[in-house]
Amino acid sequence: MYNYSGSPTVKNCTFKWNSARGTYSSGGGGMYNYGSPTITNCIFTGNSAGWGGGMYSYCGSPTVTNCTFTGNSAQGDGGGIYGGGTITYCIFNENSAQGGGGIYSDGGPTITNCVFTDNSAESGGGIYGHWVTITNCTLTGNSADSGGGIYHSGTVNNCILWANSPEQISGGMVTVTYSDIEGGWPW
Protein backbone atom coordinates (compact mmCIF):
# COMPACT_ATOMS: atom_id res chain seq x y z
CA MET A 1 0.00 0.00 0.00
CA TYR A 2 1.37 3.41 -0.98
CA ASN A 3 -0.05 6.34 1.04
CA TYR A 4 1.23 9.66 -0.30
CA SER A 5 -0.04 12.91 1.25
CA GLY A 6 -2.96 11.07 2.76
CA SER A 7 -3.87 9.67 6.13
CA PRO A 8 -6.19 6.72 5.56
CA THR A 9 -7.68 4.50 8.23
CA VAL A 10 -6.68 0.88 7.59
CA LYS A 11 -8.34 -1.89 9.66
CA ASN A 12 -8.30 -5.69 9.72
CA CYS A 13 -5.93 -6.12 6.74
CA THR A 14 -3.09 -8.51 6.01
CA PHE A 15 0.05 -7.42 4.12
CA LYS A 16 1.85 -10.62 3.15
CA TRP A 17 4.93 -11.39 1.00
CA ASN A 18 5.23 -7.96 -0.61
CA SER A 19 8.43 -6.17 -1.54
CA ALA A 20 9.52 -2.66 -2.42
CA ARG A 21 11.76 -3.34 -5.36
CA GLY A 22 14.40 -1.17 -6.88
CA THR A 23 17.30 0.49 -5.21
CA TYR A 24 18.72 -0.08 -1.76
CA SER A 25 16.83 3.03 -0.62
CA SER A 26 13.32 1.76 -1.48
CA GLY A 27 10.98 1.78 1.49
CA GLY A 28 7.89 0.02 2.71
CA GLY A 29 7.56 -3.60 1.64
CA GLY A 30 4.06 -3.82 3.09
CA MET A 31 3.14 -0.14 3.43
CA TYR A 32 4.74 3.23 2.56
CA ASN A 33 3.42 6.31 4.39
CA TYR A 34 3.94 9.97 3.62
CA GLY A 35 1.33 11.19 6.07
CA SER A 36 -0.26 10.00 9.30
CA PRO A 37 -2.46 6.94 8.75
CA THR A 38 -4.31 5.05 11.47
CA ILE A 39 -3.58 1.32 11.26
CA THR A 40 -5.51 -1.12 13.48
CA ASN A 41 -5.69 -4.93 13.77
CA CYS A 42 -3.42 -5.56 10.77
CA ILE A 43 -0.82 -8.25 10.08
CA PHE A 44 2.47 -7.58 8.26
CA THR A 45 4.28 -10.81 7.44
CA GLY A 46 7.12 -11.81 5.10
CA ASN A 47 7.50 -8.35 3.53
CA SER A 48 10.86 -6.90 2.44
CA ALA A 49 12.35 -3.58 1.36
CA GLY A 50 15.49 -1.47 1.47
CA TRP A 51 14.03 0.34 4.52
CA GLY A 52 11.01 -0.62 6.59
CA GLY A 53 10.34 -4.20 5.55
CA GLY A 54 6.84 -4.20 7.00
CA MET A 55 6.12 -0.46 7.07
CA TYR A 56 8.03 2.70 6.15
CA SER A 57 6.84 6.10 7.38
CA TYR A 58 8.38 9.29 6.07
CA CYS A 59 7.26 12.73 7.19
CA GLY A 60 4.29 11.79 9.29
CA SER A 61 3.21 10.21 12.53
CA PRO A 62 1.17 7.04 12.06
CA THR A 63 -0.91 5.50 14.82
CA VAL A 64 -0.40 1.73 14.84
CA THR A 65 -2.56 -0.32 17.23
CA ASN A 66 -2.95 -4.05 17.82
CA CYS A 67 -0.87 -5.07 14.78
CA THR A 68 1.53 -7.97 14.27
CA PHE A 69 4.85 -7.68 12.40
CA THR A 70 6.47 -11.05 11.79
CA GLY A 71 9.20 -12.27 9.44
CA ASN A 72 9.73 -8.91 7.70
CA SER A 73 13.19 -7.80 6.57
CA ALA A 74 15.03 -4.68 5.46
CA GLN A 75 18.41 -4.39 3.76
CA GLY A 76 18.89 -1.13 5.67
CA ASP A 77 16.96 -0.25 8.81
CA GLY A 78 13.59 -1.17 10.31
CA GLY A 79 12.73 -4.81 9.72
CA GLY A 80 9.20 -4.40 11.10
CA ILE A 81 8.76 -0.60 11.08
CA TYR A 82 10.93 2.31 9.98
CA GLY A 83 9.67 5.63 11.34
CA GLY A 84 8.03 7.31 14.30
CA GLY A 85 4.49 7.60 15.52
CA THR A 86 2.45 5.99 18.26
CA ILE A 87 2.76 2.22 18.44
CA THR A 88 0.50 0.39 20.92
CA TYR A 89 -0.38 -3.25 21.67
CA CYS A 90 1.74 -4.58 18.78
CA ILE A 91 3.81 -7.75 18.41
CA PHE A 92 7.19 -7.82 16.64
CA ASN A 93 8.57 -11.31 16.00
CA GLU A 94 11.45 -12.60 13.85
CA ASN A 95 12.03 -9.38 11.89
CA SER A 96 15.53 -8.47 10.69
CA ALA A 97 17.47 -5.41 9.50
CA GLN A 98 20.82 -3.63 9.86
CA GLY A 99 19.39 -1.29 12.51
CA GLY A 100 16.25 -2.00 14.50
CA GLY A 101 15.10 -5.54 13.78
CA GLY A 102 11.65 -4.72 15.17
CA ILE A 103 11.56 -0.90 14.95
CA TYR A 104 14.01 1.77 13.76
CA SER A 105 13.25 5.44 14.40
CA ASP A 106 15.04 8.75 14.52
CA GLY A 107 11.78 10.54 15.26
CA GLY A 108 11.05 9.73 18.89
CA PRO A 109 8.15 7.28 18.72
CA THR A 110 6.01 6.28 21.68
CA ILE A 111 5.95 2.50 22.06
CA THR A 112 3.51 1.13 24.65
CA ASN A 113 2.33 -2.36 25.64
CA CYS A 114 4.27 -4.10 22.84
CA VAL A 115 6.14 -7.41 22.70
CA PHE A 116 9.46 -7.92 20.84
CA THR A 117 10.74 -11.49 20.45
CA ASP A 118 13.49 -13.06 18.34
CA ASN A 119 14.21 -10.01 16.17
CA SER A 120 17.75 -9.43 14.89
CA ALA A 121 19.92 -6.57 13.61
CA GLU A 122 23.47 -5.25 13.68
CA SER A 123 22.32 -2.59 16.18
CA GLY A 124 19.14 -2.74 18.22
CA GLY A 125 17.77 -6.25 17.77
CA GLY A 126 14.36 -5.24 19.14
CA ILE A 127 14.40 -1.43 18.92
CA TYR A 128 16.84 1.16 17.56
CA GLY A 129 15.81 4.74 18.15
CA HIS A 130 16.60 8.23 19.31
CA TRP A 131 14.47 9.87 22.02
CA VAL A 132 12.16 6.88 22.13
CA THR A 133 9.65 6.45 24.94
CA ILE A 134 9.11 2.75 25.72
CA THR A 135 6.49 1.83 28.34
CA ASN A 136 5.04 -1.52 29.53
CA CYS A 137 6.90 -3.52 26.87
CA THR A 138 8.55 -6.95 26.92
CA LEU A 139 11.73 -7.60 24.90
CA THR A 140 13.13 -11.13 24.94
CA GLY A 141 15.33 -13.29 22.72
CA ASN A 142 16.37 -10.42 20.43
CA SER A 143 19.94 -10.25 19.14
CA ALA A 144 22.37 -7.74 17.62
CA ASP A 145 26.06 -6.91 17.51
CA SER A 146 25.19 -4.18 20.04
CA GLY A 147 21.96 -3.51 21.88
CA GLY A 148 20.33 -6.91 21.68
CA GLY A 149 17.10 -5.60 23.17
CA ILE A 150 17.37 -1.85 22.70
CA TYR A 151 19.93 0.50 21.16
CA HIS A 152 18.78 4.04 21.78
CA SER A 153 18.48 7.19 23.78
CA GLY A 154 15.29 8.01 25.64
CA THR A 155 13.22 6.44 28.40
CA VAL A 156 12.34 2.87 29.35
CA ASN A 157 9.58 2.56 31.96
CA ASN A 158 7.95 -0.53 33.47
CA CYS A 159 9.49 -2.91 30.90
CA ILE A 160 10.93 -6.42 30.95
CA LEU A 161 14.20 -7.05 29.08
CA TRP A 162 15.43 -10.64 29.32
CA ALA A 163 17.59 -13.03 27.29
CA ASN A 164 18.58 -10.45 24.67
CA SER A 165 22.09 -10.82 23.28
CA PRO A 166 24.78 -9.58 23.78
CA GLU A 167 23.26 -7.07 26.25
CA GLN A 168 19.81 -5.79 27.14
CA ILE A 169 20.38 -2.07 26.41
CA SER A 170 23.19 -0.18 24.69
CA GLY A 171 23.60 3.28 23.25
CA GLY A 172 23.34 6.88 24.37
CA MET A 173 21.50 8.52 27.23
CA VAL A 174 18.90 6.10 28.57
CA THR A 175 16.68 6.63 31.61
CA VAL A 176 15.34 3.37 33.04
CA THR A 177 12.64 3.24 35.74
CA TYR A 178 10.54 0.45 37.29
CA SER A 179 11.87 -2.19 34.89
CA ASP A 180 13.05 -5.79 35.22
CA ILE A 181 16.34 -6.07 33.32
CA GLU A 182 18.38 -9.26 33.29
CA GLY A 183 21.72 -8.52 34.94
CA GLY A 184 20.38 -5.23 36.41
CA TRP A 185 20.81 -1.70 35.18
CA PRO A 186 24.05 0.01 36.30
CA TRP A 187 23.18 3.62 35.61
Image (cartoon, rainbow, N blue to C red):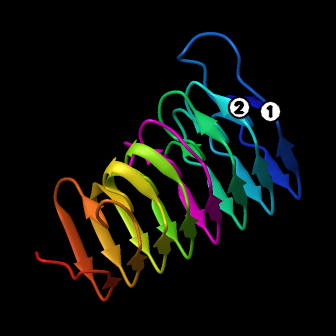
Q: Residue at x 48, y 29 (%)?
A: 76
Nearest to the observer: residue 173 or residue 85? 173
Q: Which residue is found at the position 75% from the left and 26% from the top? A: 19
Answer with left or right where residue 96 lies relative to residue 2. Answer: left
For the residues labelled 2 and 1, the Cα–Cα distance comes to 9 Å
Identity, as a three-letter code, of the amino acid under mark 2: Gly
Q: Residue at x 69, y 46 (%)?
A: 37
**Residue at position x 65%, y 66% in the image:** 90
Q: Is residue 159 visible?
A: yes
Amino acid type for the residue under numbered disc 1: Met
Answer whether residue 86 is magenta in the image: yes
Identify the image quadrant of the N terminus: top right
Quadrant of the snapshot with the C terminus: bottom left
| Label 2 Cα neighbours within 10 Å, binned few <14 / some 14-19 / many ≥20 | many
Q: Which residue is mark 1?
A: 1
Label pair 2/1, CB-CB below 8 angstroms: no
Q: Which residue is mark 2?
A: 29
**SS assignment at label 2:** loop
